[in-house]
Image (tube, grey):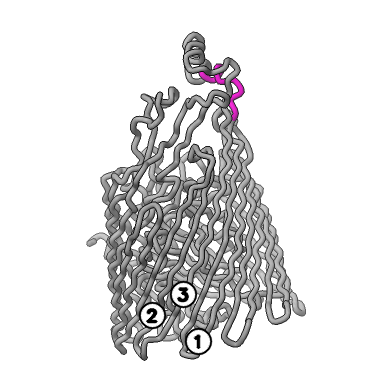
Amino acid sequence: MARLLPLLVGVSMLGASLSPSLAATPSAAATELTIFGDMPVVLSAARLIQPLDDAPGAVTVIDRQMIEASGARDLAELLKYAPGFQLGRFKGATPLTTYHGLSDDQSRRMLVRVDGRSAYSPYFGSAIEWAKLSVDIDDIERIEVFRGSNSAAYGSNAFLGIVDIVTRPAADTPRFRTRITEGANGLQDQMVSVRQRLGDATARLTLGQNRSDGTDPNHDSYRNQRIDGRIDWPLSPDDTLEIHLGFVDTRADEGAAEDITDPERSTDSYTGFAQARWRRQLASGDELKLTYFHQEERYTDPGFRLPSLSSYLINVAGFSPAAVNAFFVSNGIPADAYVDGSINNRALRDDIELEHQTLLGERARLVWGGGIRNDRVRSERVFSRDDDIHIRQRRLFANLEYRLPPMWTFNAGAMIEDTSETGPRVSPRLAVNLHLNKQLTTRAAVSRGYRNTSPFERQADVRYAEARSGYVLAQTLQPSGDLRPEKVTAHEIGLRFQSTDGFSSIDLRVFNEEINQLLERKTTASNISPPPPLNSKGESPLYINGASATINGAELSGVYRWGTDAWIGGHYTYTDIDSNVIEAQISAPREAFFLFAATQLPWQWQLSGGWGYMGMMSWYDDDDWIHGYHHASARIAKRWRTGNTTAELAVGMDRIAGAVSDYRPEISRPPEGYVTLRLTY
């Protein structure tokens, strides 16, 4: 800690966290926030509309002005503005994000929500699949990043943090918009959006497409097409209805030319959802909210096909012709045996939730509610069964805010979750905020959270068998059986400074996160008899609750703004992981920082950019260390206005400091320039 404090003080002089005031980002998107005037507020920390000074934890707010100035092409890129996050690119279409490490190519321990809908998708491994979100980056009003466990408010998937995305109301968008981006490495983006009045309702429809040649030297180019719609319908002075619709289709290249069991091929996946959210304002000032959504995901991968199993066993696996013949005869395998390695996955989710916010006198507010979720998952390849796996969840939650003005704010809450797979769990939280004066607030919080294991982690049974006889030749994952939920006990203390005009802030978070029952992979005897002959020693991996980790560190962030389009800020993170598993211990960099700035120039020019450093780490693999690297970006934009039409031309460059390897040392992302044209009417 002695080494840490001078660094914290040095970074604090630069300014850091993105918590701009609402005055700096006026919008009809969340008119309920105006009850706090110019105070910076958040929606998602405790399910209550709160000033940041009263929130039960550290929150980074990324507003629309910051999103536009960033030049980001996808949502995952925006998390570089929040301290404590690591970003990588697993494949061209697959960005990876994690908070405080503990992640491989499966981002399991954080939650992403879009307008109240959970985007956590743990069915077949990867939990946060950013490419499957239909929302366009220009339709986002704000992003709230709660840094720390928030299971007390949002359940097990918010194990280490939550990213809450709030889109703009349909009426707050122009009648017509389009965006075109062209850049290096085959980069092509197109978007068109229209807004239309439908009687009392207002509708927005946005269509978009992204293309790229992927990451060098992978065969991983991709094309992502999406449709996103929103309808805001005031049913009465007290009732409103929001309808959200979305569809995403992604075609991505996979594999390598020289790998017979992972050949070059194209995969196809799509996700579609429909959501309805009804709000009622009660005479007492209370609010009722009812949300329902249905979501469907499908994934098709031709995988591989071995037309001649005997040739593969002799030429690749190293068996002698005599041994192969004897093996075929003794196990009833035909001479023309072949293997089909295709994959077809399907997942359905239905979720309904009721939430009630109420005032309890002049000093207290309460939000409480409950929900039911039903998931159905099917994959013959992943689970070695041709029927649905059903997962049912019931939840109850409550969060209470109690104020003792002028100095104290208390937050207490809990979530009770009961799933058909793991039974009931209670995730509580208690936080105390002490307002030393109107500008300076300290906070202390303690919480406990659980992450329920997924169907993939518990029941995956990935087998490859000879197509006619069904004889199992290889098993890459076997069922893990009963797994206990992962458990985190988190402690934090914080200090927040907010300028009187709300434009500038500094936030310090010092944390301790103790994680038990952490999953790790272990190789043991296969559950198949006889053991698969292509598995070494007849063993295959499974998951066990064998790991633990203690994460200690600090995050310092701040920002100084002198206008709605002008700011300078940054953040610094120090993270120390102590674990009985080496892969966990090295899964986050010891030190990382990011500095960013934007300024408005004469004649409607804007200049923005960022520069950061990510220390040495590994994505849960002690054989593939990523060396520390610097990353920098810059963007200059010019706007014109003619009548009702506004145009913006922007030129930008990512990774100015040089090629970056942010997932594996052999996967390189070179500098990338782009040009973007926006038109609005």
| Tag 3: amino acid | Glu
Q: Measured from the top left, where is residue 143 in percent x and y?
A: 50, 68
Q: Earlier in the sequence, mark 2 or mark 3?
A: 3
Q: Is label 2 in a helix, a strand or a loop?
A: strand
User: Disc 1 marks which residue?
Assistant: 282
Q: Measured from the top left, where is residue 568 in percent x and y?
A: 47, 71
User: Disc 3 marks which residue?
Assistant: 355
Q: CA distance from mark 2 to mark 1?
A: 15 Å
Give the residue at the far top of this rendering.
Answer: 322
Q: Is label 1 in a helix, a strand or a loop?
A: loop
Q: Measured from the top left, where is residue 417 in percent x and y?
A: 38, 62
* Image-based side of 343 in relation to 164, left or right: right
- Which residue is at 62% across, 51% downward? 270
- Which residue is at 56% across, 20% downward? 309
**Which residue is more in the foreground, 310 or 222?**
310
- Which residue is at 35% across, 73% downward? 56
Q: Classify the position of the N terminus by image quarter.
A: bottom left
Q: Is residue 427 in sight in this rendering?
A: yes
Q: Which region shows up in magenta? A: 305-313
Question: Which numbered dot is residue 366?
Answer: 2
